[in-house]
Image (cartoon, coloured by chain):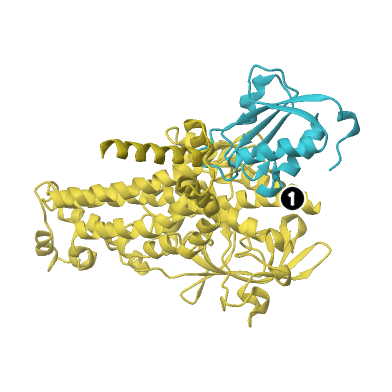
Chain colours: A yellow, B cyan
């Protein structure tokens, strides 16, 4: 087994030949296309840091299958410590890239399928779990990055998958063969898809008997015949073609580089199929995946918050207002919100549990609370970052105008700040804040891993409201309070009768 | 459920261990109360004790949630007796609805005693 370095990961993609389209053209080399490079660098960080002694404690794990050291992104969590280290890894990578590093979706897919296939086999006597373990071994051995593909295109959201006008808006089984299945359909918004080695699919929602063929999970290499990717646009994405400065984060880009994946009569051999019709386990697979994935957001987005808080503080200092009380107050607000989200994700990891498969799962209620907070607080701390940075983040001239001898000098004077800060550095930092707070990162924080309504459904379902009603009834005296009766040494009614009597006797004495 | 014939007439002691009960998803006390009743109805003479010093035939761990603060290994010091662990709506490695926990427990206890 060998863990790839960042460079080795990028070079490993050259061996693959996925069918990728962008701007209406077929992209022949993923590695060399300038529009894709920031995303490759972001994902490469997940490989690179595993080789650094100062990060390997959280970036690597011991495989429960082989006992060998592996990249944590290919690991199935086997203890609370693993769950905690996973979110620590997310925060670290958010700090190192300032954006989405894409590899967590596949990690969560691996874990969710591991947990669910075990339970399917317990009920139906199938062998999905053993198949999946063999696949997982390959992932670990090759240090692959699988793209987790859950969200279907979905068409009319009011109709079930099997009732859609266009059947391919959901991925589904078209044919069952002796040696595998034929699938067709569309997955949308798939993070890191074009620069992954593999795709692992999962159903996007709870299915019913009539959606049996839509209850499907499998893995295929990205260059499988019949698989096509269409790379999605992002806010200001072509800035990366205009030079270095204007992109804001030219090294790692904005969010994850999402793509639509179209499956057209794709053959999947049985050994790579992990669910084929067991619709009664789609809820478990979806909820298990969502739980893992929602917990991540309290790690990665807080890592991003660390970067944007640093940038805001730096800009305030460069502008000569670093000590102003309203600036300190805003930065403190940002820190408090980020650490609140961090507390949530640590809590849902520490409160995790062992599933029947032996793998560990996070506390689903707390994971959903984590993500719901993220959908609000990322907007709020980015709003404060914009507030501190000032209107310049949306009115700065281009790098080309700074380089132009006719305008460059006066522009640099115009954008200078406190002594000791170079105007170019000030512009770099303002562009970074623009990139992080104005771009696609905000709706990604809202909808990635599921929209707020999805989190609220899970929170309501797992809140145990009946138990809370019992607590209130007990305190209010509607329900028997055994502990109180032990304290006072008698039945509650008798106790209050005696209290009333004493009060009346006392009053009689006073009067 | 029918009690195995060879258990009838014998007296068994089960060591009862509770987690701290901070935010339970099940009513731990009610489950133990119903279990006691259920075992009695089956004709089994079982003493459920929380006294840690007493010799027991098996250990029942009652955790309020799946996190299971009171892991089985924490009671291994009880002497390597068979252990059944309730972890919220799970009994050992099986997902169970709260209403079915007692039924599953009786089944496990009968198979382990």
Q: Is mark 1 on a helix, strand or loop?
A: helix
Q: Where is residue A442 in the image (x, y as percent from the top left)?
A: 37, 62
Q: Residue furthest right?
A: B5
Foreground: A87 or B41? B41
Count neighbours of disc 1 (C-alpha within 10 A) and say few if under 14, some if 14 to 19, many if 20 or more. Answer: some
Position in image of residue A414 (x %, y %): 10, 62
The quadrant of the image that shows the C terminus of chain A is: top left
Work out whether A184 lies above or below B38: below
Q: How many marks?
A: 1
Please give the residue where the numbered disc 1 appears in the rendered image.
A131
Residue under mark 1: which chain is it in? A
Q: Residue at x 44, y 51 (%)?
A: A370
Please identify the quarter of the rendering in which residue B37 is found.
top right
Viewer-proximal residue among A276 and A6: A276
Is residue A101 among the parts visible in the rendering? no
> Would you say A298 lies left or right of A309 here?
right
Residue drawn where x is 56% and y is 51% of the image: A108
Instruction: Please determine whether, in this image, residue A169 is positioned above or below residue B106.
Output: below
- Please give the name of the residue rendered at 59% of the width and 50% of the height, measured from the top-left corner: A144
User: Relative to B78, does residue A229 appear above or below in the rendering?
Assistant: below
Looking at the picture, does residue A25 appear above or below residue A64? Answer: below
Residue B110 in sight here: yes
Residue A424 located left or right of residue A251? left
Q: Tell me residue A106's x, y (percent).
A: 56, 53
Residue A220 position in % (x across, y down):
66, 59
Which part of the image, by quadrant, shows the N terminus of chain A?
A: top right
């Amino acid at each position: 087994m060998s863990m790839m370095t960042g460079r080795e990961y990028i070079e490993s993609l050259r061996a693959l030949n996925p069918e990728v389209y962008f701007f209406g053209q077929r992209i022949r080399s993923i590695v060399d296309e300038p529009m894709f490079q920031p995303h490759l660098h972001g994902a490469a960080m997940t490989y690179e840091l595993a080789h650094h002694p100062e990060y390997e404690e959280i970036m690597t794990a011991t495989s429960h299958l082989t006992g060998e050291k592996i990249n944590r992104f290919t690991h199935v969590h086997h203890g609370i410590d693993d769950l905690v280290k996973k979110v620590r890894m997310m925060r670290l990578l958010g700090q190192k890239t300032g954006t989405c590093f894409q590899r967590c979706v596949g990690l969560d897919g691996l874990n969710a399928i591991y947990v669910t296939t075990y339970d399917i086999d317990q009920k139906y006597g199938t062998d999905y779990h053993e198949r999946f373990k063999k696949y997982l071994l390959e992932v670990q051995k090759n240090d692959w990055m699988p793209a987790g593909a859950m969200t279907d295109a979905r068409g009319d959201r009011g109709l079930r998958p099997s009732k859609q006008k266009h059947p391919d808006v959901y991925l589904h089984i078209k044919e069952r063969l002796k040696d595998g299945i034929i699938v067709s359909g569309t997955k949308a918004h798939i993070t890191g898809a074009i620069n992954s080695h593999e795709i692992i699919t999962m159903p996007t929602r709870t299915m019913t008997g009539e959606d049996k063929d839509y209850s499907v999970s499998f893995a295929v290499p990205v260059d499988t015949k019949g698989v096509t990717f269409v790379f999605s646009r992002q806010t200001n994405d072509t800035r990366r073609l205009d030079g270095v400065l204007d992109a804001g984060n030219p090294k790692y880009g904005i969010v994850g580089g999402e793509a639509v994946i179209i499956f057209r009569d794709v053959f999947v051999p049985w050994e790579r199929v992990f669910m084929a019709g067991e619709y009664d386990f789609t809820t478990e697979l979806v909820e298990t995946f969502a739980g893992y994935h929602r917990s991540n957001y309290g790690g990665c987005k807080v890592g991003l918050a660390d970067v944007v808080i640093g940038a805001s503080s730096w800009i305030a200092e460069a502008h000569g207002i670093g000590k102003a009380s309203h600036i300190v107050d805003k930065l403190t607000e940002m820190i408090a919100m980020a650490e609140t989200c961090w507390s949530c994700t640590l809590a849902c990891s520490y409160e995790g549990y062992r599933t029947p498969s032996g793998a560990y799962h996070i506390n689903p209620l707390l994971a959903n609370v984590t993500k719901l907070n993220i959908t609000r607080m990322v907007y709020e701390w980015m709003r404060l970052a914009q507030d501190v940075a000032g209107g310049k983040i949306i009115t700065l001239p281009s790098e080309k105008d700074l380089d132009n001898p006719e305008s460059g000098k006066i522009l640099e004077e115009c954008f200078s700040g406190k002594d000791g800060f170079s105007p170019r550095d000030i512009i770099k930092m303002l562009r970074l804040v623009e990139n992080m707070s104005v771009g696609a990162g905000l709706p990604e924080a809202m909808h990635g891993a599921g929209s707020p309504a999805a989190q609220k459904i899970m929170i309501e379902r797992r809140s145990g409201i009946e138990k809370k009603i019992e607590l209130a009834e007990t305190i209010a005296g509607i329900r028997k309070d055994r502990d109180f009766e032990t304290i006072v040494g008698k039945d509650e009614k008798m106790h209050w009768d005696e209290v009333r009597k004493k009060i009346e006797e006392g009053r009689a004495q006073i009067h | 459920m029918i009690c195995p014939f060879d258990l009838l007439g014998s007296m068994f002691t089960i060591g009862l261990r509770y987690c701290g009960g901070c935010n339970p998803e099940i009513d731990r006390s009610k489950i133990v109360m119903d279990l006691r009743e259920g075992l009695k109805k089956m004709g089994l003479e079982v003493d459920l004790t929380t006294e840690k010093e007493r010799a027991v035939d098996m250990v029942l761990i009652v955790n309020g949630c799946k996190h299971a603060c009171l892991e089985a290994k924490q009671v291994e010091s009880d002497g390597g007796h068979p252990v059944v662990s309730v972890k919220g709506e799970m009994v050992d490695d099986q997902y169970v609805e709260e209403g079915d926990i007692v039924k599953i427990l009786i089944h496990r206890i009968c198979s382990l005693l």
